[in-house]
Image (tube, coloured by chain):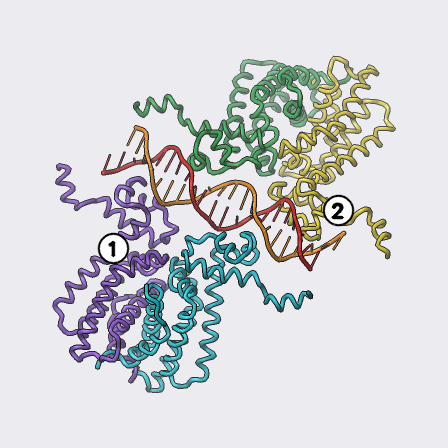
Chain colours: A purple, B cyan, C green, D yellow, E orange, F red
Amino acid sequence: MAKAAKQAKNGISDKREAILRAGVKVFAAKGFFNSKVADVASEAGVADGTVYLYFKGKDDILHSIFDRAMAEFIAEGRRELEHIDDPAKQIAKIAELHLSRLGADRSLAVVFQIELRGSTKFMEAFSAAAFAEYLEIIRKTIERGQKDGAFRSDVKPIIAAKMFYGALDEMVTNWILSKKPYPLEPLAGEVVKVFLGGLNA
Amino acid sequence: MAKAAKQAKNGISDKREAILRAGVKVFAAKGFFNSKVADVASEAGVADGTVYLYFKGKDDILHSIFDRAMAEFIAEGRRELEHIDDPAKQIAKIAELHLSRLGADRSLAVVFQIELRGSTKFMEAFSAAAFAEYLEIIRKTIERGQKDGAFRSDVKPIIAAKMFYGALDEMVTNWILSKKPYPLEPLAGEVVKVFLGGLNA
Amino acid sequence: MAKAAKQAKNGISDKREAILRAGVKVFAAKGFFNSKVADVASEAGVADGTVYLYFKGKDDILHSIFDRAMAEFIAEGRRELEHIDDPAKQIAKIAELHLSRLGADRSLAVVFQIELRGSTKFMEAFSAAAFAEYLEIIRKTIERGQKDGAFRSDVKPIIAAKMFYGALDEMVTNWILSKKPYPLEPLAGEVVKVFLGGLNA
Amino acid sequence: MAKAAKQAKNGISDKREAILRAGVKVFAAKGFFNSKVADVASEAGVADGTVYLYFKGKDDILHSIFDRAMAEFIAEGRRELEHIDDPAKQIAKIAELHLSRLGADRSLAVVFQIELRGSTKFMEAFSAAAFAEYLEIIRKTIERGQKDGAFRSDVKPIIAAKMFYGALDEMVTNWILSKKPYPLEPLAGEVVKVFLGGLNA
DNA sequence: AATGAATGAGCATTCATTCAT
DNA sequence: TATGAATGAATGCTCATTCAT
């Protein structure tokens, strides 16, 4: 098989993918600061120096893990929400996607919940870009619900959106830290029930 | 000056306090992993070696910051909640305390929201001990409300407690990362309104 | 240049050799405890970190110096003694080799006589392994002489062996510490004369 | 009891003695470089700072241990040898004193055999001063024996003295490093027998 | 004389990154 | 592209020594 053909078959790069996957695994297992570039390279089956052909440095690996996952996450979210009109059902779908996605990949969840928060630098980048977009999707959904009259209007949509995100986020963090394994996705229903209906009888 | 008088004047320990305060400031500004012990010592106005007379190491400073703040936090919470009977009002008080406390000390909030989460090791300690106690206070309040008939009973109290904590937590994290300053405490009312009353019209 | 050619030119390892030689020089000049790894690296013409590619740490350099020299020492001893039958002549040859070898490399002698004794840890390792082998060679030679009837039999061979070793060892130590330089090897004859013939007239 | 009287009763200083004794114990147990001044102070039952009222520093403790022991050693040697005329009997007495003295205090022996040799600095001081005096006593004894006609004259007295010292020294070192305990003093007779009579039948 | 809290210089080791091959 | 040997900057911690009390 010609080189070009092989490239085409394997996507832009075999190695870049392998390094990203290795990064998720290693960072989740040992923590970002305690992980060595050599660990990631070894896990990916490449030489240390090869990492620098695909990434600027250790930080860039973490950054790229986040970027790629978040892009996929948002794309999938938009795709799934397109076909839903009812804002309440959209909220339910977001919860379901959020928890099923992270619940399906514990290592990725650990990187998202723990490692990405270990530095204000990352948090700021996180906050500034893709995270804002994610929150915006939730906010707009709530806003639409308020315009429809389905949701109460005496609540600022951005606050409600953050609450919803925070609630989901906490479910994931608790799930990661829990000593006993349990399925994460089923919690989506509970969260949505309280978020939409409130706690009062 | 007599020994007792000096003690009284300086508190139990001048230096330990100074180092803890310096730790909060430095860790918040530069991140735990990027902070040097020398930075903390210098900020506290003591020699590098002095840090090791009061703490086992860099980790122990972070740990101690958390322990002390959490103990105060929980003690204040219990004290304030004693005089309140209505579970809904207790929930409101918790939100108010949570946001006013962290809203009053941005550096401490940064350490709590960002630095303490940067390692699974700390998260596990965090989760295991004091955090569990905090969550338990919320859970019991909700449970009481359910027994009273004030809160709906088709929701697991622990899930609702995590949601509530997650919502508050997200308010704090967003507040920290926000480029524009704004008061944090006023958000307590909004959070409680949605949590108790739900979003549906 | 082909890999094999380079290997041949550089020997198995250029750097490892250079570091060992530098270690002997630096340890002899400043003492093991007062030598910095950076001193050894600098003397060897490599970066600090490179030392750790070839040795586990500072201790391991000292250990390796000893192991290599002792192995050579013993190998040479066995080789030379093979062709000699007379135990008295073997004793003479041992003294000659011992003093000529150490007398030819003052730095190595310093490391052997001074630095290797600075810790019970090293002394125990020293005693346990190669040193015991060296002493055993001497002991067997004496034993053979006793069986031949050449040596008196009312002396325990192991005691005599230790005495002989101790006498040679003291010659070396005094030679090292002496302010005036003098050749070490010629003392072999004197030592052997007294050891074999005794002091009494 | 008046202060002066107490001083008189306790000797020049209680504390100095205590620190020296503690030094021997601690240095023997952990090695000079691995011993902390604080360890010695604690073992001596004094505060860290007190050590510096009696000694210039850590080095000075080791130095003083050596000086005091060596002075006693030499004084005792001279005292015992005065009453002996026969050089051969004097040689026997030196061996006996050397081995009985060090054999009676394993910690002191460890400090002498191991710790004092860990640095060329100490070895040079050692060599220069008291050790030279000790060797001189042996040398003169041999010289006298040669003049008497009791000892052979074709051997340089200083070489023979070093041999004798080296042989005794090796007995002590082996005794220290031996895993099995055995009495040291009885070896004196063996050493003297070989030294005086030689190994040849 | 005695204390012991405070000091701060000193150093072995790690590991992200480079670059000759 | 890929390698991996080599680099060298960076830092947490120790401990001999000081000095105010």
Q: Quadrant of residue C196?
A: top right
Report how far apart the C-alphas of labels 1 and 2 lie in the structure. Answer: 69 Å
Query: Which mark, residue D16?
Result: 2
What amino acid is at disc 2?
Arg
Q: Is residue E9 above or below residue D139?
A: below
Quarter of the image that includes the C terminus of chain A: bottom left
From the image, state whether disc 1 or disc 2 is nearer to you. Answer: 1
Q: Residue at x 23, y 48 (%)?
A: A17
Label 1 Cα crowd, 10 Å radius (few <14 / some 14-19 / many 20+): some
Q: Is residue C13 above or below residue A178?
A: above
Say if mark 1 contacts mark 2, CB within 8 Å.
no
Q: Quadrant of residue B156?
A: bottom left
Q: Is residue D134 above or below residue A62?
A: above
Along the viewing direction, whichever of A3 and C151 lies nearer the viewer = A3
Q: Position of residue C141 (x, y in %)?
A: 61, 20
- Which residue matches tag 1? A67
Q: Position of residue C168 (x, y in %)?
A: 64, 23
